[in-house]
Amino acid sequence: MKRNSLLVASLVWLCGACSSADQADAQQPAGNQNATLTQQVAALSDAGKLAEAEQLARSQGAPGLALLGEVLVLRGQLAAADSVYRASITARAPGYRTAQAGLAELAWRRGDRAQSLQLAQTLTNAYVSGSNWNADDCVAAGRAFVIAGTTDKQAVKNALAAFDRAVEVDASNLEARLRVGDLFLDKYEAPEAKKSYEDALKLAPKNSRATLGLARVEDFYGRDEAGLVKASLQANPFMTNALLMVARKHLEVEAYDSADAVTRRALAVDSSSMTAWALLGASAWISGDSAEYKRALASARKLNPGASEFYSEMADAAVRNRRYGQGVQLAKLALAADTLSTRALGIVGTNELREGKMEEGRATLERAFAIDPYNVWHKNTLDLLDLVRTFKTIDRGNFVVVAPPKEADLMSVYLLPLLQEAYDTLSRRYQYKPAGKVRLEIYDRHADFSVRTVGLAGLGALGVSFGPVLAMDSPRARETNEFNWGATAWHELAHTFTLGSSGNRVPRWLSEGLSVAEERRARSGWGFDETLEFFEAYANGKLRPVSQLNEGFLRPRFPQETILSYNLASLVCEMIEQQWGAASIPALLKGYRDGLETPEVFLKVLKVTPDSLDRAFDAYMKKRYALPLAAVAPPGSPPGTAGPFVLAMRKAAELAKEGKTEEARTELLRAQAMFPDYAGPNGAAWQLAMIEKERGNLKAAVDQISRITTRNGTAFEAIMLEADMREQLGDTTGMKRALERVIWINPYDPAMHARLAVASTRTRDFKRAILERRAILALDPADKLDAQYELARALIDGGELAEARRTLLNVLEQSPAFEKAQTLLLELRSRAPATRDEEIG
């Protein structure tokens, strides 16, 4: 919804007013005589001084009635606000149109949609036919149009026009700017919303609502909003919406006690907040406190018997805690109370898609979009579903792979065997099997993947698991060297097992840690490698202890905390398995499935408290990684201080620049001794490999380069160098292993597949040779006939004679004069005559 287009569409409402004013207009002269009082009450309210704001409004008699009603709403005294609004309207007191808007909003909150729309329409009709409205009256009309916009798409545009008109009448009107920002953000126009909030802050630099609006914009983009929320609460410690935003974040990281405490602070200010009761209910429901949940629901029903927003907020909390199926059930309860709730429809539709119910999800989102065509998440998702209908589906074994036609055949050649291997391995380890087939969607554009996962482009992840449905980028969607698609697929499938075996109750940190640990078990070089940044962060206490590790994923304090937390979580899992045995991991997951919270699970399975596990892990880290921890700058060093490892690397670089190769080599070996497992770019191993290669000492060079390739699954250049050097050494088996790693980084080079096929044949790995020849065909080579001929040769070597014969007959059908295929077919017939069925086939 672009602002300019809205203004143009709304000009009729500004320019086509009737010449005659209604009686109410005659009693409301131009210019807002109540403006000063309005600003004073608003300033007190925005500072959280609600008692003083109420006292001031009461002291003004009739002119303060509408403002008193606004303050009473903020204090949760809805019945009193209703009476005051009605008194203002009856007396036609200054600001009575604000009272009309407030009365319509109260009816909406009670669930009386019909009365709310009727009251709103009365006000909007007066605005359209009237004239001489002051700024506050225009704001009131905008509020009424917002209500009307739930059933009338044009009314949303009219609301914006009314708010803009208020600013034209009175450029100092703060409320109008705040309402414009809220409207834009509610309709997913975050850039316009941000501009409106910034305009408001120019008028009132510490305005808590505008600051919170900017926080919501940051949250919309998936960025850290905590600083802005804090600033909003500093300006107004009693701002209910800011407190609830904090409570939601606590709930996301499973800090239920903290969420409850903040929510109760909000309720102490405004006991009529449906969102607050919903968050209290969600916390109780997630943690299994049925009595507290029932109390929260009862309080919500007193406010609105249908409690649609209560269930929608509950559903959203369930989804944020990865309980997608339960989120759908709760959102359907919301729909039972309000069939037009686009929020509930969106939750149902989006999560039906996450459960693999593609047609049901599409139909639900189409209903939502028909009601609210401004919802960019719904629009983008529906557009994506149209695209997915053009994808190719491969249904085999325990999996359904859905991918763009140009990707599907190649991806499935590798992924289906890998996924089945992972499925068998993980089902044994976690003593669990998914109920049905696992669906994997592959996207060759990262923007499409982002839409599938959150509904809006911009997600930075490589893959995602919803349990029965996985989605990931294809290698084509990413730069070479930053993505190992085999490791990503294994990682996401591991989530299917940890989520499923825990009833979707496993904490985020544990599920992610197990997925990384499973990557490492699957193949050397997969999973996160050890970096200097990781050990610097750990040594300086920048990473969270185990008991707070969820916050490292969901509330990062510095840009790299989330990515470093993946590695940290995997090491926690490795320690648990080493010290408590392999059976401890499934036992932890079972504890979560049975409804236990983390302290209870730790105590039952590991016989430790969270604090003692924190201490045990710290001791484990300091023992296991004593060398690299000693190689970084000491804790507390000034920013930018180089540790022994970096100093040694710098010295080696200086020596190399001076041509002192042997001295540089000595310094590099010293650096490597400090941090033996470093596999990053241009590290000691890489430079030592280059020195040895230059000297012609290929075996030593290979020894060094393999220190990288066995630890870093995306080191494309290093892996290719290893393959080349092993080939020069005559190590065909080693070359083959290196090329197999390359495929998981870049599978699009036919020459690479041919090279691997030849190496596989030489090492008598005929199954792999056949796979590589099939991969070449999947890449749609220029010479398809020759590619099929080479496949036939590989099939013969592998003993698959019938398939080889069919392949050759297909070649000759397309090109009867293909001499090599004729010769090979004659040779094949002499080895094993065809059956009649094979000849006919």
Image: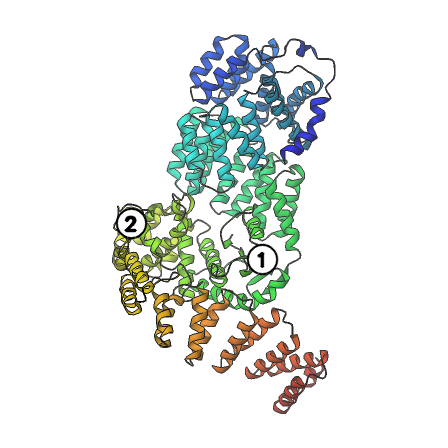
Q: Could you tell me which residue is drawn at 55 percent across and 8 percent down?
A: 62
The reply, left or right, for residue 164 in relation to residue 79 is right
Q: Pick the residue in front: 805 or 663.
A: 663
Q: Mark 2 against mark 1, which lies toward the viewer?
A: 2
In the picture of the structure, the residue carrying the numbered disc 1 is 444
Give the spatial CA distance, label 2 vs label 1. Answer: 42 Å
In the picture of the structure, the residue carrying the numbered disc 2 is 641
Q: Position of residue 91 (x, y in %)?
A: 60, 9
Location of the C terminus by quadrant is: bottom right
- Which circle's residue, 2 or 1, is located before the other in the chain? 1
Q: Position of residue 625 (x, y in %)?
A: 28, 58
Judged from the image, the secondary structure of the residue bearing numbered disc 1 is loop
The residue lying furthest to the front in this view is 658
Q: Position of residue 551 (x, y in %)?
A: 39, 44
Judged from the image, the secondary structure of the residue bearing numbered disc 2 is loop
Instruction: Please count the marks in the image.
Output: 2
Q: Position of residue 122 (x, y in %)?
A: 67, 19
Q: Is residue 292 visible?
A: no
The reply, left or right, for residue 92 in relation to residue 202 is right
Q: Pick the residue in front: 511 or 537.
A: 537
Q: Pick the residue in front: 761 or 54.
A: 761
**Circle number at residue 553:** none
Q: Pick the residue in front: 179 or 633.
A: 633
Position of residue 453 relative to residue 703, above or below, is above
Residue 399 sits in which quadrant? bottom right
Inspect the image, locate mark 1, and give the three-letter code of the amino acid beneath it: Asp
Position of residue 240 relative to residue 429, above or below, is above
Location of the N terminus by quadrant is: top right
Q: Is residue 633 visible?
A: yes
Q: For the residue carrying disc 1, how many other residues have a C-alpha within 10 Å: few (<14), some (14-19), or many (20+)? A: some
The reply, left or right, for residue 827 in relation to residue 604 is right
Inspect the image, locate mark 2, and give the three-letter code of the amino acid beneath it: Thr
